[in-house]
Amino acid sequence: MELALSLGDPSKPFSLLGNTPKLSRSKDLGFCMGIGDGFKSQHKIDAFEAQSKGGDSDEKRVHSDPPLHLHLLPSSQTQLRIPCLTLKYGDGRGLDVNQLPPAVAAAEEDDEESEEGAAISSPNSTVSSFRMDFGIRNGKNKGKRDLEVERVSDDDDENGSTRKKLRLSKEQSAFLEESFKEHNTLNPKQKLALAKQLNLRPRQVEVWFQNRRARTKLKQTEVDCEYLKRSCETLREENKRLQKELQDLRVLKTCQPFCMQSPATTLTMCPSCERLATKGSAAIAATGYPPFFSFANTCDPKTSPSPPSNFFKSLDVTSEKT
DNA sequence: GTATGTACGTAGCTTACGTCA
DNA sequence: CGTGACGTAAGCTACGTACAT
């Protein structure tokens, strides 16, 4: 797994070694490492939908970018086949709390339609005709968790205003996860479609995506933190080594009168190993002979190609007189 | 062209609840 | 069975952006 820092300008997209930010789709990765530019992609989707809708308030948001058609769901046009969910609605068992009571669901639908238009809920809509029975489970899959959920469902019926913690089913979570991999933000239409497909309230879908983004960011922060720790450790070691080299050079400078007569000792850096070498006293001390060109035994001359003449960064360490 | 108000979406923080060891 | 840690759904607030006036 590659690591990349995204601690700079938060408005800029997460970049992985220069690659375009892209949410990871790998199945084995528990979270998405890339932080996409949610606003931009969202606007692209808006632009597309405004164009396809043919003129309402959204149309004014159209960007100059070409419309980007994102497929919200893996199979929004087809029935999702999940074996444990294929029981018919209304067998009287295991009614999921996350499935709205018919009256409430109808009210929710009306609210959403009044807010966002009836595009989704039209009788001919493939989305509205598609109902996944996520709330229905057979006896085998109905466990303690479902019983718990049913209890809350009863409360929900008697008072919809109280705050309830409704655990999403595995299937619902998995489906939301798949959608999140496609894109980590939702526009109202997508939210509605997802809510309908999963028999959730649009607000639940919205909250789920909010929390999912937060979790992704948290994970990324942890990864960044680890990376910074390692970088810090590496730099500390490097600094320690360089300090020691500098100290050695200073000792040599004071101990060898020969150095006083020579011009400034020049430190050079090996292009392959990036260790310091000298064209002067240090090399003399190391070899006993004034070197013409040396990396102070830090490099294998066979494997170290000759650097261009202007490559070396020079450090004058003897220019100041003590 | 600029200032102001409004609507909306998001991030961040927090709370409350469910699950598990 | 009680308890604490952890994960997560949901509430709340601040902020940024787009748009209308």
Image (tube, coloured by chain):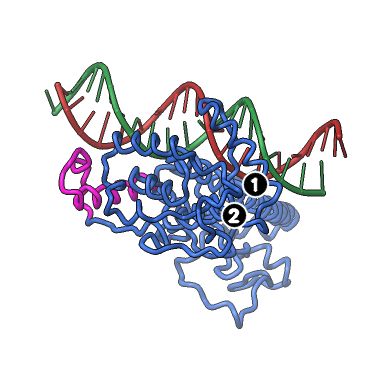
Chain colours: A blue, B green, C red
Rendered location of residue A296, percent (x, y):
67, 69
Disc 2 from disc 1: Cα separation: 9 Å
Amino acid residing under circle 2: Arg
Rendered location of residue A88, percent (x, y):
51, 57
- The quadrant of the image that shows the N terminus of chain A is bottom right
Amino acid residing under circle 1: Asp
Q: Please say whether residue A224 is visible from this viewpoint.
A: no
Q: Is residue A319 left or right of residue A74?
A: right
Q: Please say whether residue A103 is visible from this viewpoint.
A: yes
Question: Which numbered circle lies on residue A223?
Answer: none
In this figure, what is the number of numbered marks?
A: 2
Residue placed furthest toward the bottom: A302
Asked whether A87 or A225 is in front, the reply is A87
Question: Is residue A55 within the magenta segment?
Answer: yes
Residue at left offset 30%, top offset 38%? A113
| Chain letter of disc 2 in the image | A
Question: Which numbered circle lies on residue A146?
Answer: 1
Same chain check for tags 2 and 1: yes
Asked whether A300 or A91 is in front, the reply is A91
Which portion, as a residue range, is magenta?
A38-65
Q: Look at the picture and state if A85 lies above or below A63.
A: below
Q: Which residue is mark 2?
A: A137
Element type where label 1 sits in the image: helix
Q: Quadrant of residue B3?
A: top left
| Chain letter of disc 1 in the image | A
Q: Is residue B7 left or right of residue A92?
A: left
Residue at left offset 67%, top offset 70%? A298
Question: Is residue A151 within the magenta segment?
Answer: no
